[in-house]
Image: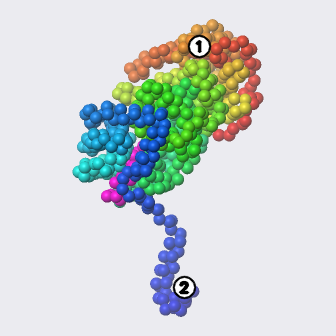
Amino acid sequence: MDAVERAGQCRGVPPRFLFVLVLSLLLAAVAPAAEPDPLAGLRPGHPRLLATAADWAAAKARIAADPLAAELHQGVLAAARATLPLPTCRYEKRGRRLLGVSRETVARVLNLAYAYRMTGDAAFARRAEAEMLAAAAFPDWNPSHFLDVGEMTTALALGCDWLDDVLTPAARATLHRAIADKGLRPGLDPHSPDNWWHTAENNWNQVCLGGLSLGALLIADEEPALARQVLALARSHNVHGLAPYAPGGVYPEGPGYWGYGTTYQVLFNAGLISALGTDWGQPDRPGFLASAGAFTQMIAPSGRYDNFSDGDDTPGFQPALFWLSRRLGQPGLLASQLRLLQAGEPGLRGAMHERFAVLALLWWPAQTADAPALPLRWLGRGRNPIVVFRESWTDPAALYLAVKGGAAGLNHGHMDAGSFVLEADGVRWGVDLGAQDYFSLEAKHVDLWNMKQDSQRWSVYRINNHSHSTLTLDGQLHRVDGHAEFTGFSAESAAAVLDLTPVFAGQAASVHRGFRLLPGRRVLIQDELRGLRPGTNVRWQMTTRAEVSCQGTTATLRQAGHTLTAQVIGADGVAFAVEPAEPPPDDFNAHNPGAHLLVATHVTPANGVLRFAVVLTPGASAAPLPALAPLETWPVSHLTP
C-alpha cells in the first residue's frame, strides 16, 4: 500500500478517488492559465470607439481655442456638406479590388458622423446612415482582397458607434448584421485562402485585424461570442503585423506604407483603450512607438518623403502621428503635420485627401513645438535600414541625404539597396521615381507580386536597379535575397559605410559604399569593389529631374534656379554621361518624362579591384577635391548586423 492509499484510508476517502483528485490538482498546476476575457472591461453604451462623449466635448474645446484646429474643423464640415447631395457609393471593383469604394466610404462616413457630433445637424446623420445602408446592401465586401473588408468594416463600425443615438432601430439592426456577416465572420476561418493575412508580417495584418476589431467592439453587446472570437484572433495574431517595426522603427515598406499600417494599428489600439480601458500592451512591441521618430526622419526639409520601395514622395497628412505624439509626450513630432496645415488652402486640401483627417481633431495636441527633438544624423535599424544626414530641422533649404540598405525581396521592395535621396537649397537633386500604378501592371498580366529572382516583377523599370541611384554590374539585376547592412556609422563625422556584398552575390567578392558629409556642404559617395571579373562594366548612376550638362569628369545639374556639381575622382578615363530615365520598349512600363540618369561607367582592371568616388556639391564651391582613403580607415564606429 502506497502513501496515497494510506492517507486516503486515514481520512475515510476512497483511495481511487484521492488518486484522481491529486492527479487533477497536478494537471491544473501545470496547465496554462486561461486567456483573459477579450471583452473584460467593456464600456457600456456608445460612443465608445476612439472617443467617448467626454472626448468629443474636449475636442470641441480644443478646436475653439486653436485657430489651426478650427481651420481643419471647417474643412471637415465643408467636405461633409459636399457629400450631402452625392449619390451613395456603388459596388464597383477596379480589377480585383473594391478598395477604392471602401476608402471612399470611410471618408464619407467619418466626415458626416463627425459633422453631426460637432454640430448636431441631423442632415449629416441621415446622409451617413444612407451611405452605410448602401454598403450594407452590397453582395459582399470583397473578401478575396480582404483589405477591402477591413476598411469597410471600419467605416460602418465607427459610423454606427458615433451615430448610435440617432440611427433608426431598423438601420442599426441592418448595419450591425452586415458588420457581423460581411465583415467579421469571413475573416475568422484560418484555413480560408482569403485569410492568409492572419500571420502576414505587413500592413494587411493591421488593416484587417484593426478593422474587424472595431467591428467586434461595436457589436459586442448583442453578439458577444462572435466579438470574443474576433478579438481573441486579433490579440494573438497582431504580433505578426507589428514584427516589421523591430528593432528601431524603420518600416520596411517605406513612409507611405508606414502611414497605412500604422494608422490601422493606432485605430486598433485606440479602440481597445476607449472601449476596454486597455491596449493589451500591443504598442509596446519593439520598434512600434519608435517608428514615429523614424517616420519623421523620412521627411525631408521640403516636406517630401524619402520614398524608397513602392512609396510616393508626395507629403501626406498622417493623423496617426497625432495619437503617437500624444502617447509619447513628444509634440515636436507633429511639426511636419502642422506645417502642412499652415500652408493655407493647398495644405488643407492635401489634409482633406486623407480619409482619417477627422482623427487629428480628436487627438489634437494641447501644446506644440517648433521642431522634433530628434538627431540630425541618424541610423535607423530594421529590415530596410536607413541612414539620414541633415543640416537642420527648421530650414527648408537645408541639405538632406537619406541612404537605403535592405533587400529587394521584402514586401513592396525594389532593387534599390545603396540608393539615396538628396536635397539642398529646397531642391530634390537625387530622386526615386517611385512605384508604377499597380492596376496598370496587373491589367497587362504582369506577375507583380512574385518576389523570386526570375519574376517578371523585376522587369518593371521603376522597381529594378536600372532606375535607381545605385550600382549595376554588367547590366545584371541585383540579387533579390541579398540584404545590405550598414557596417559603419558616425554621427560626429557624418559618415556611414554600407556592405552591398550580398546584393551582388556571384558578381563580385565584396562591394562596399560609403557616404560622408564634407566641409562646404559637399557629399562624398565612395565605392569599393573587389573580386570582379576583369573588364566588368561597373555603372554608377544618380536619378534626377534636373537638367544635366556633362564635361568630362564634371557634371552640372540645374533646377529651380539652383545648381549642383558632380565630380568623379579616383578613376582614370571615366567621364559623366546623361541618359533619359526611360524603360526599354514594351507594353507595360510607364514613361518617366523629365527624369534623367547621370551615369559614370568604370571598366574593371586586371586585378579585379575598383575604388572611386563622386563628390556632389550644392551651389558653387572652390574647395579642393578630397583624397580617397580606404573605407576601412573612415572615422566610423564598427556595427554588427
The way the protein has been coloured in the rendering is rainbow
Identified by mark 1, the residue type is His
Residue 389 seen in the current view: yes
Residue 429 is marked as: none
Quarter where residue 571 is shown: top right
Q: Residue at x 53, y 38 (%)?
A: 251
Q: CA distance from mark 1 to mark 2?
A: 92 Å
Label 1 vs 2, first from the N-terminus: 2
Q: How many marks?
A: 2
Residue position for label 1: 562
* Residue 579 point in image, percent of width and height: 53, 13
Q: Secondary structure at mark 1?
A: strand
Q: Position of residue 282 (x, y in %)?
A: 51, 51
Q: Is residue 305 visible?
A: no
Q: Is 209 colored magenta in this rendering?
A: yes
Q: Which residues are magenta?
A: 205-224
Image quadrant in which you'd find residue 546: top right
Q: How many C-alpha atoms fall within 10 Å of the one at disc 1: few (<14), some, or many (≥20)?
A: some
- Residue extending farthest top: 551
Q: Quadrant of the image for the N terminus? A: bottom right
As helix, strand or loop, the secondary structure at mark 2 comes to: helix
Instruction: Name the residue rendered at 65%, 40% in the picture.
Output: 641
Q: Which residue is mark 2?
A: 4
